[in-house]
Amino acid sequence: MILEDVNLDGQPVRMTLSGGKIAAIDPSPGPASRTILPLPVEPHVHLDKAGTISRCRPEAPGLFGAIDAMARDKANWTAEDLRSRIEAGMQEAWQAGCRAIRSHIDWDGPAAPLAWDVASVVAQDWASRMPLIRASLSAIDVVGDPDLGPAIAARVARDGQVLGAFIYRHPDLANRIPFVFDLAEKHGLMLDFHVDEGLEVEATGLDLIIAEATRRGMGDRVLCGHACSLSIRPDAARAIDAMARAGVALTVMPTTNLYLQDMAPGRTPRLRGLAPAQELRAAGVPVLFGTDNVRDPFYPMGVHDPLESLRLAALSAHLAPGSWVDAITTTPARALGLADRPVAVGEVADFLVLPAPDVLAALARPGVPRMVIRGGVPQP
């Protein structure tokens, strides 16, 4: 297979595929009519919640209204219901071209929830196509409780997955966060925190995570998500610099952050709650874009498609999208512990082909069309 006049890293090239690999990349006179990108990596979704909005409408606005609605809907979470919705999310991400996906799974007590077991079965079924990495998602006062957290961490470790926590102005964070790090060190686990998902300057759980990661030299094993309070904190620059020094990465979620933050009925939001992606990356923090919630009380629209996250991030954070492709490809791959998969001679021919001369033109409209190449073969 030969791809003529394609844009690879800003240069028009002629690419030859053979035996499932990239056999040659040669300069082309151009102009390019199509653009090649590495397969994206989805670092942050909630497959256990996805697709519930039709039966699960929040009664109150904002993050905690969505949390309450989701808690009520859990009565509907049978194995059949969970499997159907998780499979649908996986298929949507696969069709979008994802090479791997990390999903958070709600975990409210010491025993593994049904959703964890169902997601584990789905992960086994998909293992040869697209890894489904699972991260437990417990409130910090659950996983950080010495009577509850050890059982959660032991099960997560047994399954070879990721330990996670939700942190938002909980009490006793100065003790609970170090305890979660203790569990991660004991079991050799990666950590993934939902942190400071709100618009209060007092929401500074991120600082405690950074301090603990720095003290233990664990920054490259820690991924944080949201950090909405950075958008209004007067000392945000100090926190960002500390984060960069620690090596802690941050996932920004444009859909849910824009949808939930500063939400009040009958009033246009003034504060959008998006973590300052430009300043974070300029300081050296690895910045990722995640899809987060899809068609559930936290975000009632959306698709499992990192290209759509990049498109919305470009709009909401005033980014040049061609300069931020790494936020949905190489940066999340590294943050999730995946091997680099460059589009280069001798590498497996896994990539996207977008029918546009550059990334900006490709993202100009929602529903970005694409050809997904896996192992040198176009995906049907």
Image: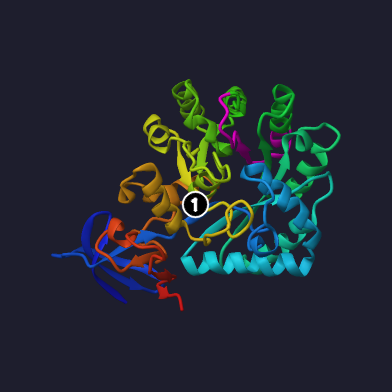
Q: Is residue 166 visible?
A: yes
Quarter of the rendering occupied by the N terminus: bottom left
Work out whether 333 lies above or below 126.
above
The magenta region covers 183-201
The image quarter in which residue 197 lies: top right
Percent of width and height locating residue 308 = 44, 58
Residue 202 screen position, x and y as percent? 60, 23
Residue 276 shown in magenta: no
**Residue bearing the label numbered 1:** 339
Residue nearest the observer in this picture, 183 or 371: 371
Work out which residue is located at the far bottom of the displayed protein and give it. Answer: 380
Between 178 and 355, the one nearer to me in the picture? 355
Q: Position of residue 246 (x, y in %)?
A: 51, 27
Could you tell me which residue is drawn at 21 percent across and 57 percent down?
11
Kind of residue indicated by mark 1: Ala
State the scheme by which the image is colored: rainbow
Q: Name the residue nearer the viewer: 228 or 376.
A: 228
Task: Classify residue 48 by image quadrant.
Answer: bottom right
The relative height of residue 250 versus residue 377 in the rendered view (above or below) is above
**Which one is in front, 333 or 54?**
54
Looking at the picture, how far across and down is residue 236, in whole percent?
A: 47, 25
Mark yes or no: residue 345 visible: no
Disc 1 crowd, CA 10 A, few/some/many (<14, 14-19, 20+) = few
Residue farthest right in this picture: 147
Write the residue at 54% across / 67% down.
92
Q: Is residue 339 left or right of residue 354?
A: right
